[in-house]
């Protein structure tokens, strides 16, 4: 239960950061790339609320699977999936995205590395 609470607090902090970045920053590096870097740690925290164990899946494979999910979403954006599915909901279009950008894949990769760095330092607390 303690782990779930920690990941829930992390999830809320990251979600708040994403919302505030989107609402108040109108341009610049952080607005353009910061949210894309943080989306993978946000999703990782969410999945760790649901699956708090420390097995190989959650600690080693999950960050990579989330990266692959981000790449798939980005590729679907390149295929204009929101338009092809006639999605008109503004919220869904924001979540799915509508513009392909190869730099977003780099941001997802950076987010994955951020998760692995967190896991490394968490497992080596004596450093």
Image: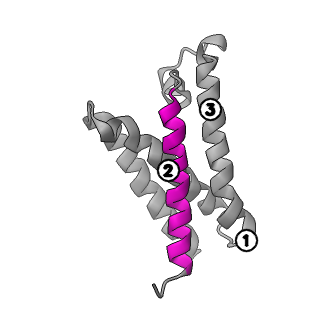
Which circle marks residue 73 in the picture? 3
Specify the quadrant of the image occupied by residue 54: bottom right
Looking at the picture, does residue 71 appear above or below residue 114? Answer: above
Viewer-side label of 2, 3:
2
Q: The residue tagged with tag 2: helix, strand or loop?
A: helix
Nearer to us of marks 2 and 1 is 2
- Which residue is at a point 59% across and 23% down the rendered structure image? 77
State whether residue 116 is above or below residue 28: below
Nearer-the-camera pick, 78 or 54: 78
In the picture, the quarter occupied by the C terminus is: bottom left
Q: Label 2, on which residue?
A: 110
Asked if the residues shown at circle 2 and circle 1 are in contact, with their CB atoms under 8 angstroms apart, the answer is no
The residue drawn where x is 37% and y is 41% is 19
Tell which of 78 and 8 is nearer to you.
78
Where 17 falls versus 4 (above or below)?
Answer: above
Residue 124, image x, y percentages:
53, 82
Colour scheme shown: one colour
Q: Is residue 19 visible?
A: yes
Q: Picture quarter containing residue 60?
A: bottom right
The first of marks 2 and 3 along the sequence is: 3
Badge 1 marks a residue whose secondary structure is loop
Q: Is residue 115 magenta?
A: yes
State the separation of the CA atoms marked 3 and 1: 26 Å
Q: Earlier in the sequence, mark 3 or mark 1?
A: 1
Q: Residue at label 1?
A: 55
Residue 122 point in image, percent of width and height: 52, 76
Quarter of the image with the N terminus is: bottom right
Question: Going by the image, does 11 lie left or right of 23?
Answer: right
Q: Which mark is residue 10?
A: none
Give the magenta part as a residue range.
101-123
Circle 3: element type: helix
């Amino acid at each position: 239960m303690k782990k779930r609470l920690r990941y829930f607090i992390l999830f809320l902090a990251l979600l708040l950061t994403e919302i505030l970045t989107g609402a108040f920053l109108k341009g610049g590096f952080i607005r353009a790339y910061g949210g894309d870097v943080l989306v993978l740690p946000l999703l990782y925290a969410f999945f760790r609320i649901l699956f708090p164990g420390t097995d190989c899946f959650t600690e080693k494979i999950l960050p990579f699977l989330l990266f692959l999910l981000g790449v798939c979403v980005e590729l679907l954006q390149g295929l204009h999936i929101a338009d092809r599915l006639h999605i008109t909901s503004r919220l869904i279009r924001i979540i799915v995205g509508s513009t392909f950008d190869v730099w977003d894949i780099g941001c997802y990769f950076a987010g994955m590395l951020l998760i692995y760095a967190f896991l490394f330092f968490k497992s080596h607390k004596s450093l």
